[in-house]
Amino acid sequence: MTAHSLTWRSATSRLILVYGALFAAWGLILVGVIQWETTRYLNNVIDQIIVQRMHYLADTEQERLPATVDAAGLIDPHGVMSVGLFDASGKVLAGNIRSYPSTIVVDGVPRLLPGGIPRPFRADGLVRARAVASRLPDGRILVIAKDTSTLDGLGIIVWRALLWGISLTVIPGLLGGFLLRRGPARRIRALQQATDPIRQGDLTKRLPVGRRGDELDLLAGIVNTMLDEIERLMNEVKGVCDNIAHDLRTPLTRLRARLYRAQQQLLGQPQAALLDACVTDVDGLLARFRALLRVSELEDRNRCACFAEVDLDQVLKQVHEFYAPLAEDRGQPFILDLQALPPVRADAHLMFEALANLVGNAIKFTPSGGSIQLRAQMDKLGPRIDILDSGPGISADERDAVTRRFYRGDNSRTTPGSGLGLSIVSAIVRLHGFALEIGDGDAGARITLYCYTPEPGQVTKPRQVPALAAA
């Protein structure tokens, strides 16, 4: 997920959007209520005006009414206040209304004319108006209408004011939200950078805590307290394991020496074979203790201080030369496939040890006549090393467990070993900040070492590897 998408998914951005939406909705409701109340009030005023004008004209003498209506029309030449006198059939008798409105109701009640009032000086010939019509005692019809363009203009002004108000509020709000969001986003990036070494196993690191005392600082303090306790427990467990391994090496070494002397004294006797088996078992125990202490040594991150630029091609060639005779003795073709790789910052001896462990396992678990391939190439993000074999492989449900100490898979329980080889490899990989992936090759197991520090989810899915050549 990109930093841009994370920025707009932040709580500050969502809060700004929610408040903006609420403000816009409330503004629309408020302006709608204002316009409705204003329209209702002005309609009442217009209705009162035209009703009063109707009463005035209706009380005029019948003979003088056409002249009075014409005079009222001349006073208002633009038709803001329209007056018309019609006979019973709708013929124009006087006034400035040129035709009888077909939609008007003759009942003395002011209404909004759906079709408007005809006006020849208007482009469309009609204007919106409120009108009242009354039938006079002699059968004639008196119509008075008032143009509502002033009312419509007021509505336009109100809505423009709403748009300006929203614009002048939302734009500064977005700008302020952007500025407010930069601080938390910066702190989140700092927290993310602080968690990278912790994720890689360095429990001595802590999250930065500012002096604001806000939610982020409170959360960072809680996480730091958890890390303190986790580091303490891990150190206690590691210390117990290291002390046991260290303290038992001396008595076991003495026990082996005594068993060996007894074996030499009983050479040629039946008890010698039993003592030889005991010496072998003690050697296995000592190898396990040495491996445990080796893992503990590799978990000391201070060793990173001696890292230097390492030529991976040279290390891979040394591993191939070291194991090629053993693979040849087992009838296993050992293929080295190298591309030009840039140097990486690492410990050359540890890289040799890790790759030697992986190649040694591949040779050990591949049956005679199988094949091994050591391949290096450039990935999209950096150098990548694949160890491929045609052995039984590692089942998917065991791939996470095989790097734990003393774990023996179903395919390796009858094979000599301590179950600590991949633990040492995993410790070396973590020390360098690299990534290790166990998967399926075309004919057996595939173990990939990514010689760079990947972001979460950035390790590319390995492409299908070609089939290894048969012996």
Image (cartoon, grey):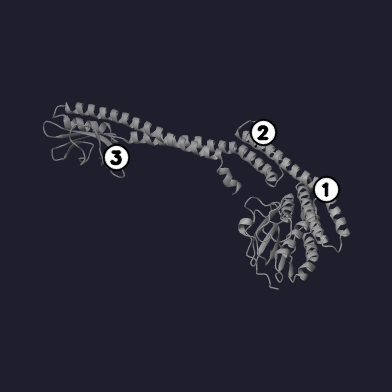
Q: Label 1 amino acid?
A: Pro
The secondary structure type at the circle numbered 3 is strand
Q: Residue at x 70, y 57 (%)?
A: 449
Residue bearing mark 3: 127
Residue 451 showing in the rendered view: no
Residue bearing mark 2: 210
- The label on residue 251 is 1
Q: Quadrant of the C terminus?
A: bottom right
| Labels 1 and 2: the sequence-earlier one | 2
Q: Residue at x 64, y 36 (%)?
A: 220
| Left or right of 400 in this view: 174 | left
Q: Nearer the viewer, mark 3 or mark 1?
A: 1
Q: Residue at x 88, y 59 (%)?
A: 264
Looking at the image, the residue that sits furthest to the left is 138
| Labels 3 and 1: the sequence-earlier one | 3
Task: Note whether 297 is above or below 268 in the view shown.
Answer: above
